[in-house]
Image (cartoon, rainbow, N blue to C red):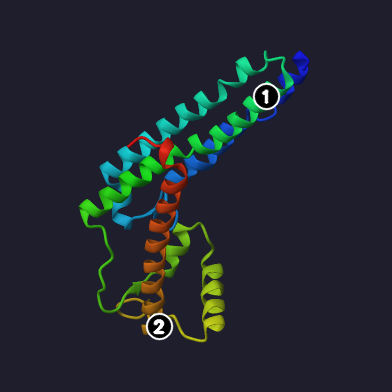
């Protein structure tokens, strides 16, 4: 293999670690109360322990991505075509696995912190819903949030939100009984999905993770 062939081969994928790192770094930003794959209450998002864990996650992710780019440097000097292709494919596989290690470490730490702090949603009779605040939290127009809600109610055939007009005490909205049941079922689903994802990740990639 020529020098230029090796250069093109290795540099063709050198952008992969920083691209994956940028994508995973965005997971540290709260999205629908989810930070690095862990559902947290709104008040926990500014907790010093949570901020420290996400800051460590970003640092680890940066150094992992930089380290994963380094093998491309000696790779361009390998002349043997078969060896070059073998090492290149191993490098790509290592990138896809190793770049997720900081994510898994932070996710586990956040889940432990969540359990230690008792950050669980407790049933409290009737839940009050602030659709406008929820829409702002997701960078969504209020009108679009209402459209999504009405479409969901039409598809499910049930009313999910009971709104009341403003008055002396101001307007607002509450979840209906069906809305409460749907929310409770979704939270159980998310919890089970997180547990299943962790189990599968540990099954396939556990040997590469630090205990």
User: What residue is at 43 percent from the left and 38 percent from the top?
Assistant: 101
Q: Which residue is mark 2?
A: 178
Task: Tell me if I can see residue 174 in this picture.
Answer: no
Give the mark nearer the N terminus: 1 vs 2.
1
Residue 105: image quadrant is: top left
Q: Is residue 115 left or right of residue 83?
A: left
Residue 127: percent from the left, percent from the top?
Answer: 32, 75
Q: Which residue is mark 1?
A: 10
Residue 22: percent from the left, percent from the top?
Answer: 53, 38
Label 1's element? helix
User: What residue is at 48 percent from the left and 86 percent from the top?
Assistant: 158
Label 2's element? helix
Q: Is residue 150 left or right of residue 37?
A: right
Decide: few, some or many residues near mark 1? Use Cα within 10 Å; few <14, some 14-19, many ≥20. many
Query: Residue at the front extreme?
Result: 82
Q: Considering depth in this image, is 2 or 62 the residue closer to the camera?
A: 2
């Amino acid at each position: 293999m020529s020098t230029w062939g090796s250069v093109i081969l290795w540099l063709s994928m050198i952008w992969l670690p920083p691209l994956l790192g940028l994508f995973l770094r965005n997971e540290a930003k709260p999205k629908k109360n989810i930070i690095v794959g862990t559902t947290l209450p709104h008040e926990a998002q500014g907790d010093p322990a949570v901020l420290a864990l996400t800051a460590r996650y970003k640092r680890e992710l940066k150094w992992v991505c930089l380290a994963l780019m380094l093998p491309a440097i000696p790779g361009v000097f390998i002349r043997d075509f078969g060896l070059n292709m073998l090492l290149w494919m191993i490098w790509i596989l290592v990138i896809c696995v190793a770049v997720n290690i900081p994510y898994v470490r932070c996710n586990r730490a956040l889940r432990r912190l969540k359990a230690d702090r008792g950050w669980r949603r407790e049933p409290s009779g009737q839940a009050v819903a602030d659709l406008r605040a929820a829409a702002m939290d997701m960078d969504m127009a209020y009108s679009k949030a209402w459209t999504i809600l009405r479409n969901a109610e039409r598809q499910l055939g049930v009313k999910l939100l009971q709104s009341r007009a403003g008055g002396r005490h101001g307007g607002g909205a509450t979840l209906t009984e069906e809305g409460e049941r749907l929310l409770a079922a979704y939270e159980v689903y998310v919890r089970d999905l997180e547990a299943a994802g962790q189990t599968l990740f540990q099954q396939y990639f556990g040997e590469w993770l630090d205990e």
